[in-house]
Amino acid sequence: MRGAQGIKEERLVRIRKPGRVRDQLWFLGCEESGVYLFEGKDGSTLISGGMSYIVTDVLQQFKEFGIDEQRISKLLILHAHFDHVGIVPFFKRRHPEIEVYASQRGWEILRMEKAISTINEFSRMVAKRMGRGEVYSLYDLDWRDDVMGGALRDGDRLDLGGIEAHILETPGHSSCSITTYLPEWKVLFPSDGGGIPFDQTIVTSGNSNYTKYQQSLERLKPLEVEYYCADHYGYVTGEEAKEFIPKTIERAKQLRRRMEEAYRSTRDIDRAAEKLVASFYDENPRYFLSREIFVEVYRQMVRHIASVIEGNL
Protein backbone atom coordinates (compact mmCIF):
# COMPACT_ATOMS: atom_id res chain seq x y z
CA MET A 1 0.00 0.00 0.00
CA ARG A 2 1.19 3.52 -0.77
CA GLY A 3 0.62 6.82 0.98
CA ALA A 4 -1.14 9.81 -0.55
CA GLN A 5 2.00 11.09 -2.26
CA GLY A 6 3.49 7.77 -3.27
CA ILE A 7 5.79 6.96 -0.34
CA LYS A 8 5.76 3.35 0.81
CA GLU A 9 4.21 2.83 4.24
CA GLU A 10 6.31 -0.09 5.46
CA ARG A 11 9.11 0.46 7.98
CA LEU A 12 7.78 3.85 9.05
CA VAL A 13 8.75 4.81 12.60
CA ARG A 14 7.10 8.16 13.12
CA ILE A 15 6.50 9.42 16.64
CA ARG A 16 3.89 12.16 17.00
CA LYS A 17 3.16 11.99 20.71
CA PRO A 18 5.12 14.47 22.86
CA GLY A 19 7.63 12.88 25.20
CA ARG A 20 11.25 11.82 25.52
CA VAL A 21 13.08 11.34 22.23
CA ARG A 22 16.20 10.06 23.97
CA ASP A 23 18.24 10.97 27.04
CA GLN A 24 18.30 14.78 27.46
CA LEU A 25 16.03 15.41 24.44
CA TRP A 26 12.27 15.99 24.47
CA PHE A 27 9.60 16.52 21.84
CA LEU A 28 7.03 19.06 23.08
CA GLY A 29 3.89 20.70 21.74
CA CYS A 30 1.38 18.73 19.70
CA GLU A 31 1.25 16.58 16.59
CA GLU A 32 0.95 19.32 13.99
CA SER A 33 3.37 21.72 15.68
CA GLY A 34 6.28 20.76 17.89
CA VAL A 35 9.48 22.07 19.43
CA TYR A 36 12.39 20.23 20.98
CA LEU A 37 14.12 20.75 24.30
CA PHE A 38 17.71 19.66 24.90
CA GLU A 39 18.78 19.43 28.55
CA GLY A 40 22.45 20.43 28.68
CA LYS A 41 24.85 20.44 31.60
CA ASP A 42 24.54 24.15 32.32
CA GLY A 43 21.12 24.89 30.88
CA SER A 44 18.48 23.79 28.41
CA THR A 45 17.88 24.81 24.80
CA LEU A 46 14.54 25.11 23.01
CA ILE A 47 14.97 24.23 19.34
CA SER A 48 12.38 25.92 17.09
CA GLY A 49 9.42 28.07 18.14
CA GLY A 50 6.31 26.26 16.94
CA MET A 51 2.88 27.80 16.55
CA SER A 52 1.66 30.25 19.13
CA TYR A 53 -1.19 28.16 20.51
CA ILE A 54 1.05 25.30 21.65
CA VAL A 55 2.28 27.41 24.58
CA THR A 56 -0.37 25.87 26.85
CA ASP A 57 0.72 22.37 25.81
CA VAL A 58 4.39 23.14 26.39
CA LEU A 59 3.80 24.62 29.85
CA GLN A 60 1.71 21.61 30.87
CA GLN A 61 4.33 19.21 29.50
CA PHE A 62 7.04 20.91 31.56
CA LYS A 63 5.04 19.84 34.63
CA GLU A 64 4.17 16.36 33.35
CA PHE A 65 7.71 15.50 32.27
CA GLY A 66 9.49 17.17 35.18
CA ILE A 67 11.27 19.71 32.98
CA ASP A 68 12.71 22.71 34.79
CA GLU A 69 11.60 25.76 32.81
CA GLN A 70 14.03 27.95 34.74
CA ARG A 71 16.99 26.10 33.15
CA ILE A 72 16.13 27.27 29.62
CA SER A 73 19.03 29.46 28.54
CA LYS A 74 18.89 29.32 24.71
CA LEU A 75 16.23 29.28 22.02
CA LEU A 76 17.01 28.55 18.36
CA ILE A 77 14.78 29.91 15.59
CA LEU A 78 15.29 27.72 12.53
CA HIS A 79 13.36 30.03 10.23
CA ALA A 80 11.07 33.02 10.60
CA HIS A 81 7.71 31.73 9.33
CA PHE A 82 4.76 32.28 11.67
CA ASP A 83 4.35 28.58 12.49
CA HIS A 84 7.95 28.30 13.74
CA VAL A 85 8.29 31.39 15.93
CA GLY A 86 4.98 31.37 17.80
CA ILE A 87 6.12 30.81 21.39
CA VAL A 88 9.34 32.82 21.11
CA PRO A 89 7.96 36.19 22.31
CA PHE A 90 6.23 34.55 25.28
CA PHE A 91 9.35 32.81 26.57
CA LYS A 92 11.67 35.74 25.86
CA ARG A 93 9.39 38.10 27.81
CA ARG A 94 8.86 35.55 30.59
CA HIS A 95 12.60 34.86 30.85
CA PRO A 96 14.52 37.88 29.46
CA GLU A 97 17.84 36.14 30.12
CA ILE A 98 17.18 33.53 27.40
CA GLU A 99 19.56 33.94 24.45
CA VAL A 100 17.57 33.78 21.20
CA TYR A 101 19.37 32.81 17.98
CA ALA A 102 18.38 32.93 14.31
CA SER A 103 20.14 33.41 11.01
CA GLN A 104 21.14 36.94 10.02
CA ARG A 105 18.42 36.89 7.36
CA GLY A 106 15.98 35.61 9.97
CA TRP A 107 16.55 38.65 12.15
CA GLU A 108 16.18 40.96 9.15
CA ILE A 109 12.74 39.46 8.48
CA LEU A 110 11.71 39.57 12.13
CA ARG A 111 12.41 43.31 12.20
CA MET A 112 10.16 44.03 9.21
CA GLU A 113 6.81 45.60 10.12
CA LYS A 114 5.02 43.70 7.33
CA ALA A 115 6.54 40.36 8.37
CA ILE A 116 5.56 40.89 12.01
CA SER A 117 2.01 41.79 10.94
CA THR A 118 1.78 38.63 8.83
CA ILE A 119 3.16 36.43 11.63
CA ASN A 120 0.54 37.77 14.05
CA GLU A 121 -2.33 37.56 11.56
CA PHE A 122 -1.56 34.01 10.44
CA SER A 123 -0.85 32.82 14.00
CA ARG A 124 -4.25 34.00 15.19
CA MET A 125 -5.94 32.58 12.08
CA VAL A 126 -4.53 29.09 12.59
CA ALA A 127 -5.11 29.17 16.36
CA LYS A 128 -8.77 29.92 15.67
CA ARG A 129 -8.95 27.21 12.99
CA MET A 130 -7.56 24.67 15.48
CA GLY A 131 -10.09 25.76 18.14
CA ARG A 132 -7.36 27.31 20.29
CA GLY A 133 -8.01 31.02 19.79
CA GLU A 134 -8.57 31.58 23.52
CA VAL A 135 -4.83 31.26 24.13
CA TYR A 136 -4.43 34.91 23.11
CA SER A 137 -6.58 36.01 26.05
CA LEU A 138 -4.30 34.08 28.42
CA TYR A 139 -0.80 34.89 27.19
CA ASP A 140 1.15 37.68 25.47
CA LEU A 141 2.00 35.93 22.20
CA ASP A 142 2.10 38.67 19.55
CA TRP A 143 5.42 39.56 17.95
CA ARG A 144 6.59 43.12 18.45
CA ASP A 145 9.98 44.79 18.11
CA ASP A 146 11.18 43.77 21.57
CA VAL A 147 12.59 40.32 20.68
CA MET A 148 16.26 40.40 19.69
CA GLY A 149 19.20 38.00 19.77
CA GLY A 150 22.32 36.60 18.17
CA ALA A 151 22.92 35.69 14.53
CA LEU A 152 24.02 32.20 13.45
CA ARG A 153 25.91 31.59 10.20
CA ASP A 154 26.79 28.59 8.11
CA GLY A 155 29.52 26.57 9.79
CA ASP A 156 28.92 27.95 13.29
CA ARG A 157 29.24 25.62 16.26
CA LEU A 158 27.05 26.19 19.29
CA ASP A 159 27.73 24.58 22.66
CA LEU A 160 24.44 23.30 24.05
CA GLY A 161 26.05 22.20 27.30
CA GLY A 162 27.97 19.01 26.74
CA ILE A 163 27.17 18.53 23.07
CA GLU A 164 28.02 20.63 20.02
CA ALA A 165 25.39 21.76 17.55
CA HIS A 166 26.51 22.35 13.94
CA ILE A 167 24.68 25.09 12.03
CA LEU A 168 24.03 24.81 8.28
CA GLU A 169 22.34 27.46 6.18
CA THR A 170 19.70 25.63 4.14
CA PRO A 171 17.72 28.23 2.16
CA GLY A 172 14.87 27.37 -0.15
CA HIS A 173 11.90 26.76 2.08
CA SER A 174 12.61 30.27 3.25
CA SER A 175 15.49 32.63 2.58
CA CYS A 176 16.41 32.45 6.28
CA SER A 177 16.29 28.69 6.92
CA ILE A 178 18.99 27.05 9.00
CA THR A 179 19.40 23.42 10.03
CA THR A 180 20.82 22.25 13.35
CA TYR A 181 22.72 18.94 13.46
CA LEU A 182 24.09 17.09 16.47
CA PRO A 183 26.74 14.82 14.90
CA GLU A 184 27.57 13.07 18.18
CA TRP A 185 24.00 11.80 18.44
CA LYS A 186 23.16 11.84 14.70
CA VAL A 187 20.16 14.07 15.37
CA LEU A 188 18.91 16.39 12.61
CA PHE A 189 16.63 19.41 13.12
CA PRO A 190 15.91 20.63 9.56
CA SER A 191 12.64 22.42 10.29
CA ASP A 192 10.75 22.75 6.98
CA GLY A 193 14.07 22.88 5.12
CA GLY A 194 13.65 19.11 5.00
CA GLY A 195 10.55 17.04 4.33
CA ILE A 196 7.46 17.11 6.56
CA PRO A 197 6.45 13.60 7.79
CA PHE A 198 2.71 14.12 7.43
CA ASP A 199 0.50 11.05 7.80
CA GLN A 200 2.36 8.26 5.94
CA THR A 201 3.87 10.51 3.29
CA ILE A 202 6.41 13.33 2.92
CA VAL A 203 5.35 16.89 2.15
CA THR A 204 7.95 19.09 0.46
CA SER A 205 7.69 22.87 0.64
CA GLY A 206 10.31 24.95 -1.15
CA ASN A 207 8.32 28.15 -0.67
CA SER A 208 11.02 30.75 -1.20
CA ASN A 209 13.08 29.19 -3.98
CA TYR A 210 12.37 25.60 -5.00
CA THR A 211 15.72 25.18 -6.72
CA LYS A 212 17.63 26.27 -3.62
CA TYR A 213 15.39 24.01 -1.53
CA GLN A 214 16.43 21.03 -3.62
CA GLN A 215 20.08 22.07 -3.41
CA SER A 216 19.81 22.30 0.38
CA LEU A 217 18.34 18.80 0.53
CA GLU A 218 21.32 17.50 -1.42
CA ARG A 219 23.60 19.17 1.11
CA LEU A 220 21.86 17.33 3.96
CA LYS A 221 21.95 13.97 2.19
CA PRO A 222 25.47 12.88 3.36
CA LEU A 223 24.66 13.41 7.05
CA GLU A 224 24.20 10.33 9.20
CA VAL A 225 20.76 10.54 10.79
CA GLU A 226 19.23 8.37 13.50
CA TYR A 227 16.67 10.93 14.68
CA TYR A 228 14.96 13.15 12.13
CA CYS A 229 13.29 15.85 14.24
CA ALA A 230 10.69 17.73 12.20
CA ASP A 231 8.74 20.75 13.41
CA HIS A 232 5.44 19.41 12.04
CA TYR A 233 4.14 15.91 12.77
CA GLY A 234 6.83 14.76 15.13
CA TYR A 235 10.08 12.92 14.62
CA VAL A 236 11.28 9.88 12.70
CA THR A 237 13.57 7.16 14.01
CA GLY A 238 15.11 3.88 12.89
CA GLU A 239 15.70 2.92 9.28
CA GLU A 240 13.31 5.54 7.95
CA ALA A 241 15.28 8.32 9.64
CA LYS A 242 18.38 7.21 7.75
CA GLU A 243 16.49 7.25 4.46
CA PHE A 244 14.31 10.29 5.08
CA ILE A 245 16.39 12.94 3.30
CA PRO A 246 17.01 10.76 0.20
CA LYS A 247 13.27 10.01 0.05
CA THR A 248 12.51 13.71 0.45
CA ILE A 249 14.82 14.47 -2.47
CA GLU A 250 12.84 12.07 -4.65
CA ARG A 251 9.55 13.50 -3.45
CA ALA A 252 10.79 17.03 -4.23
CA LYS A 253 11.61 15.96 -7.79
CA GLN A 254 8.10 14.52 -8.19
CA LEU A 255 6.45 17.71 -6.96
CA ARG A 256 8.62 19.84 -9.21
CA ARG A 257 7.44 17.83 -12.22
CA ARG A 258 3.83 18.29 -11.13
CA MET A 259 4.29 22.04 -10.77
CA GLU A 260 5.96 22.26 -14.18
CA GLU A 261 3.08 20.35 -15.75
CA ALA A 262 0.45 22.48 -13.99
CA TYR A 263 2.09 25.72 -15.12
CA ARG A 264 2.70 24.58 -18.70
CA SER A 265 -0.94 23.47 -18.99
CA THR A 266 -2.31 26.80 -17.75
CA ARG A 267 0.47 29.37 -18.28
CA ASP A 268 -1.10 31.03 -15.25
CA ILE A 269 0.50 31.03 -11.78
CA ASP A 270 -2.75 31.47 -9.83
CA ARG A 271 -4.66 28.79 -11.75
CA ALA A 272 -1.78 26.36 -11.49
CA ALA A 273 -1.50 26.94 -7.73
CA GLU A 274 -5.24 26.47 -7.20
CA LYS A 275 -5.16 23.26 -9.21
CA LEU A 276 -2.22 21.86 -7.22
CA VAL A 277 -3.72 22.81 -3.86
CA ALA A 278 -7.08 21.26 -4.75
CA SER A 279 -5.27 18.02 -5.61
CA PHE A 280 -3.23 18.19 -2.39
CA TYR A 281 -6.27 18.58 -0.13
CA ASP A 282 -8.11 15.80 -1.98
CA GLU A 283 -5.23 13.55 -0.93
CA ASN A 284 -4.47 15.19 2.46
CA PRO A 285 -7.67 16.71 3.93
CA ARG A 286 -6.28 16.76 7.50
CA TYR A 287 -3.23 18.91 6.77
CA PHE A 288 -2.86 21.64 9.39
CA LEU A 289 -2.55 24.72 7.15
CA SER A 290 -5.72 26.40 5.96
CA ARG A 291 -6.39 26.30 2.25
CA GLU A 292 -5.97 30.09 2.00
CA ILE A 293 -2.46 29.98 3.45
CA PHE A 294 -1.46 26.93 1.43
CA VAL A 295 -2.60 28.52 -1.83
CA GLU A 296 -0.14 31.35 -1.13
CA VAL A 297 2.60 28.78 -0.46
CA TYR A 298 1.96 27.17 -3.83
CA ARG A 299 1.78 30.53 -5.59
CA GLN A 300 5.31 31.23 -4.36
CA MET A 301 6.58 27.85 -5.50
CA VAL A 302 4.87 27.98 -8.90
CA ARG A 303 6.08 31.55 -9.42
CA HIS A 304 9.68 30.31 -9.11
CA ILE A 305 9.03 27.35 -11.42
CA ALA A 306 7.42 29.66 -13.97
CA SER A 307 10.43 31.99 -13.88
CA VAL A 308 12.74 29.05 -14.60
CA ILE A 309 10.53 27.81 -17.45
CA GLU A 310 10.24 31.28 -18.98
CA GLY A 311 13.98 31.82 -18.72
CA ASN A 312 13.77 34.66 -16.22
CA LEU A 313 16.14 32.98 -13.77
Image: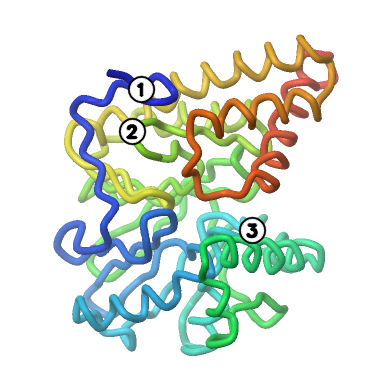
Which residue sits at x=29%, y=21%? 8
Q: Quadrant of residue 162?
A: bottom left
Question: Which residue position holds label 1?
Answer: 7
In the picture, the disc for residue 200 is 2
Which badge, 3 or 2, is on the more N-terminal residue? 3
Q: Amino acid at mark 2?
A: Gln
In the picture, the disc for residue 106 is 3
Which residue sits at x=36%, y=25%? 3
Judge from the rendering whether residue 214 lies leftward or rightward of residue 98; answer left or right.
Answer: right
Q: Nearer the viewer, residue 175 or 192?
A: 192
Task: Tell me where residue 268 appears, x and y as whole percent.
Answer: 84, 21
Residue that extends furthest to the left in the rendered view of this protein = 23
In the picture, the disc for residue 46 is none
Image quarter where the N terminus lies is: top left
Which residue sits at x=63%, y=26%? 211
Image quarter where the C terminus lies is: top right
User: Are the two marked residues, 2 and 1, in contact with CB atoms closer than 8 angstroms?
Assistant: yes
Q: Amino acid at mark 3?
A: Gly
